[in-house]
Image: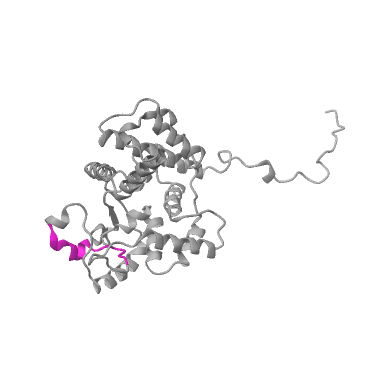
Amino acid sequence: MAGKLLADLRRAIRLKHYGPRTEEAYVGWVKRFVRFHGLRHPAELGAGDVAAFLAHLAVRSNVSAATQNQALAALLFFYEYVLGRRLGPVVPAVRAKERKRLPVVLTRREVDAVVRRLGGPARLVAGLLYGSGLRLLECLALRVKDVDLERRVITVRAGKGGVDRVTVLPDMLVEPLRRHFAVLRDRPSRVALPGALRRKLPGASAEWAWQWVFPAGRERGGIRHHLHPSAVQRAFHAAVRAAGIGKRATCHSLRHSFATHLLEDGYDIRTVQELLGHRYVETTMIYTHVLNRGGRGVVSPADRPLPPLGTLGSRNTNPA
């Protein structure tokens, strides 16, 4: 029964065209929920049982608000689209309030220091994360056809929220990408294709246009997938340490830096929103807080020049 429920869950997720990472996360949360309640059938459980599980995650497992809300979203989806019933009003009451955190932003000098310490594909990936404002998975999922070296644009296919967008390709990466593509042409392979294209266009998997910009080193089952995110993340973490940067920077910090530096250069926030692929401008507004020097740009009293020697603490004896 459990296997059938999980199969039904995967089918419902794919019908909604959710991503593979969402699918694995939702399946994982349903498994944890069932185990938490002693392997009872979910149809026997209700809103109170879901609330108890979420409370356990928050109190006992000490998960973040984002993680708790993801578990809630998974269970709401499961009950509505697999079991065919909506949970009562108890569940929304336990939705965690996520803290608004300022993103970690690197200075231009720090970005340069990190990128210089990267080599191979990781260096090109980092250049695109910072130079084009891509998310890591968006960058690794690029195909050759998505990179237009002549027009200096990159097309992101089915980004976050399933939306396509176009962003800028930095001039400084054009020649490195040309050399990179020349190497890729010498070792063509069959690649994974999205959706039903494997069946509709069986020969397309070997075509140059569909090749990954950043292919994995080895094939699996005769198919080559793109580079795994962990390979870039490890290299980036090592480069941050080697550069002596005292910030908790990740690959995503390069995207934050892209947005912040564009605003510093005077580009309007709507343009930055479009390049980042944010649905709401309020999401992009977070970078305006990073731009503000503490206290909206005021000068701290500690940075004021000291008064001339002898005037500090002196008593004014002149009644005028």
Q: Is residue 314 above or below residue 148?
A: above
Total of numbered circles in the picture? 0
* Residue 90, picture quadrant: top left
Q: Residue furthest right?
A: 317
Q: Whole-percent x and y of residue 24? A: 33, 48
Of all residues shown, which one is farthest toward the bottom? Answer: 186
Foreground pick, 320 / 2? 2
In the rendered image, the vertical position of residue 319 relative to residue 112, given as above or below: above
How is the protein colored in the picture? one colour
Q: Is residue 39 visible?
A: yes
Name the residue rendered at 33%, 62% in the picture. Answer: 227
User: Does the stretch in magenta take in 215?
Assistant: yes
Q: Nearer the viewer, residue 22 or 136?
A: 22
The percent coordinates of residue 105 (x first, y second) are 49, 51
Q: Quadrant of residue 124?
A: bottom left
Residue 89: give x, y in percent of width and height: 37, 25
Q: Which residues are magenta?
A: 201-216
Looking at this rendering, what residue extends furthest in the top direction? 89
Q: Residue at x 35, y 61 (%)?
A: 228
Q: Which residue shows up at 56% across the image and 43% down it?
A: 293
From the image, which quarter does the N terminus lie in? top left
Q: From where the camera sits, is residue 207 visible? A: no
Q: Is residue 61 toward the left or the right of residue 191 in the image? A: right
Q: Quadrant of residue 77?
A: top left
The residue closer to the viewer here, 222 or 315, is 222
Seen in the picture, residue 29 relative to 241 is either above or below; the reply is above
Q: Locate residue 110, reporting x and y percent.
A: 51, 59
Q: Quadrant of the C terminus?
A: top right
